[in-house]
Image (cartoon, grey):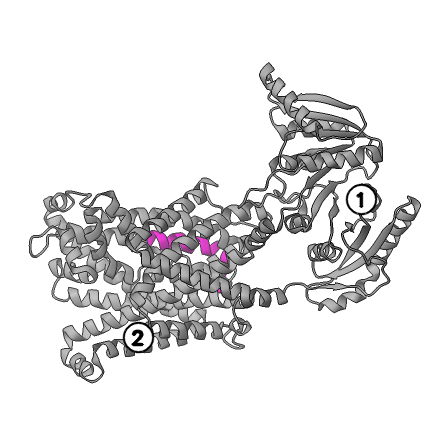
Amino acid sequence: MIGVGAMIGAGIFVLTGIAAGVAGPASILAFALNGGVTLLTAFAYAELASAIPEAGGGYAFVKRAFPGAVGFTAGWMLWFAYTVACSLYALGFAGYFWEFFLRYTPGVAEMVFGVVGQHGASLIVTLLVGTLFIRLNARGAGVTGQAENVLTVAKLIILAVFISYGLRAVGAEPAQVTEAFNPFFANGMGGVFVAMGLTFIAFEGYDLIATVAEEIKDPEKNIPKATFISLAITVVMYLLILFVALAVRTPDGTPSWQFLGNHGETAIVRAAESFMPAFGVAVIVFGGLLSTMSALNATIMASSRVAFSMGRDRWLPRSVATIHPERRTPHVAIMLTGVILLVMAVTLPIEAIGSAASLIFLLTFAMVNLSVIVLRRKAPEIPRRYKVPFYPFVPILGIVLNIFLALYQFTFQPLAWYVTIGWVVTGLLLYYGYFEKQSAAVQPQVLEAPIPSEAATTDAVVVPLHNPDTAGILLDYANAIARSRQKPLVAFSVVEVPRQLPIHEGLRFVHHREGLVKAAREHANHNDMELATDLVVAHRAHDGILAGAKRYDADFMVMGWKGYTDTRDRIFGEVADKVIRHAPCDLALLKIEKARRPKRCLFPTAGGPNASLAAEMLNVLAPAFGMSVTACYVVPVGASDVERREADRWMSKTLERLEVDVEVERKIIEATSVAGGIALESRDYDLVVLGAAREPFLSQVMFGEIPEKVARFSPADVLVVKRYDGHVRTLLKRALG
């Protein structure tokens, strides 16, 4: 009921007339289209909430996909939007409250107005109802849910009564329906788009279900179910209400859409007077009271859970993540949200800021749809009881439509964009100035082990070691590169500390890696290598590897990978993926199959931004290992002479970068796919050397599709190389997580 209660809120009562005035009879199309746009994002919420049942809803999903500044911004925006919505609902309740008294007990209302004024009376009611529902939420999700159920059922009954009387009136004059909806596009399609932007906030609410995921039983099953049921009930109710309001004959004979538009926020009340008995107005006013209470209750719950989740991540003060010892509710987050919503309701021009709430929801919903795509690749191992249908078409369409409505909103409400930009900029200043440091403080720390080390050097070629079986061959590769670049060689191993232990406790585990480091030094001595060694203590392996690279100001890193993992799309594994994205230097990732020096090398020549680095590696490795080199290019099966000449041209262009004094064989491979052709051809070779493809800006693909697939399926060792992206791209990656 939380989703239904939040969606069928004040929006349908106050926005129906406004939408009709803007779009005419086509306002019903605007509501239907908004329902369709909402459904696209509901699919995304259903999948992500079933896979990641964490407090915070959309924020939890976006931060998982983009754990840097983008994730923070999503939470910061959602918290603002929900809190503003709370203020609007509290003020809306006050308006309906005094409307009720003015109609039926005018003496009481006039007496209060005479003492504190009409504005003061509204603020008093706003404070009282806000405080009431803040206390209800602080008592727990069970109490809040019970209140929400009662309010929502009563509200649905009232609206059902409104619809039934309206349909009876329409049935008595069927010819009136045709007249009322002609012309349908009274203000053109532009009016429909404007109405969609104005009324989109009326469809916000289903997402609130995901924000309390940690307090829902069997969230993997119940959240998707509740999401779609809430949306279905809401869309059907909205369309029936709008149809009735537009189709009935007006008291003054004016077209119904003009009549509704002239009465704006009170249009539903005026429509009820046309076809309901005398008590109809009272029923609708009472329904407005229930709607605003229900929406306020649900939105306080959602806003506080976003704040709680951000506090837990140290993106808000730590105290915001405090849980009440008895009621098990985030009482500090609830109180903070409550104080902010009351202050906003009392002191700020809520109508102006509230227009930004719809815009913020559109932007964050676009980010949620994008998160579905990113997490399908980034975290495919997460169980998903529900999956978005027609993937990736549905989330892509959701992104496009949400952004379109957001941009279109600027044409009729530019202030919303100004407020949103101001809020986002403020959040980012706080993030980079304070919260980023706070969140980093709770991330796994890295500690240098106090053991004898001869690694007092910088500008080195570094080799993180983990597997004793592959340490020797990694050192052979790294030593060849270090000698060619005239750089010192450093090998280190990471001592992983259980997350539940403080970092300094890792010193007790140092002995687990001392044997590996010792074996590396023995291999170096046996092969006439100048090698320095070290140990790094960290909670997570990739943190330690990156810290080691920075400690020695790495010029180049050689990292091993034992083979394809069983996690789809994360072929290099979580540790390697993190290192690849954030390495502060040129990088070579070596998939090791045979752990021996290669003699025959396959060199695909497809160009690309890292082709020169791949050629540089061959210049080093071919003479060091005495390898023969075969350059290849993949063409389609049955390729024409023109295609073959183009392939030969590409090979010649790439081979110009080779300086090795060895004969290079050329080979054109016919295959249905480039990666498949290379992988199949590599059966007769010991090593495949590839340059990484350019990483798409918003993709989590590490090396590009072709290198990934070759590394996955080739039976030979595979060396994929990637140049350092530079400070700018590294900063962007950091922001995107």
Give x and y (percent) for residue 15: 25, 58
Q: Look at the numbered disc 2 and give the secondary structure of its residue.
A: helix
Tag on residue 126? 2
Give the residue type that dot 1 points to. Leu
Residues in magenta?
215-233
CA separation in Å, label 2 and label 1:
68 Å
- Residue 558, image x and y in percent? 75, 45
Q: Are marks 2 and 1 in contact (CB under 8 Å)?
A: no
| Nearer to the camera, 427 or 704 | 427
The relative height of residue 7 versus residue 394 in the rendered view (above or below) is below
Front residue of 331/112: it is 112
| Residue of label 1 | 474
Which residue is at a point 79% across and 55% down the rendered structure image? 493
- As shown in the figure, which amino acid type bears the numbered disc 2? Thr
- Residue 329 visible? The answer is yes
Q: Using the rendered view, name the quadrant where residue 165 is placed.
A: bottom left
Disc 1 residue crowd, few under 14, some 14–19, many 20+, Cα 10 Å: many
> Disc 2 vs disc 1: which is toward the camera?
1
Q: Quadrant of the N terminus?
A: bottom left
Residue 487, given in percent of the width and then of the height, sits at 80, 48
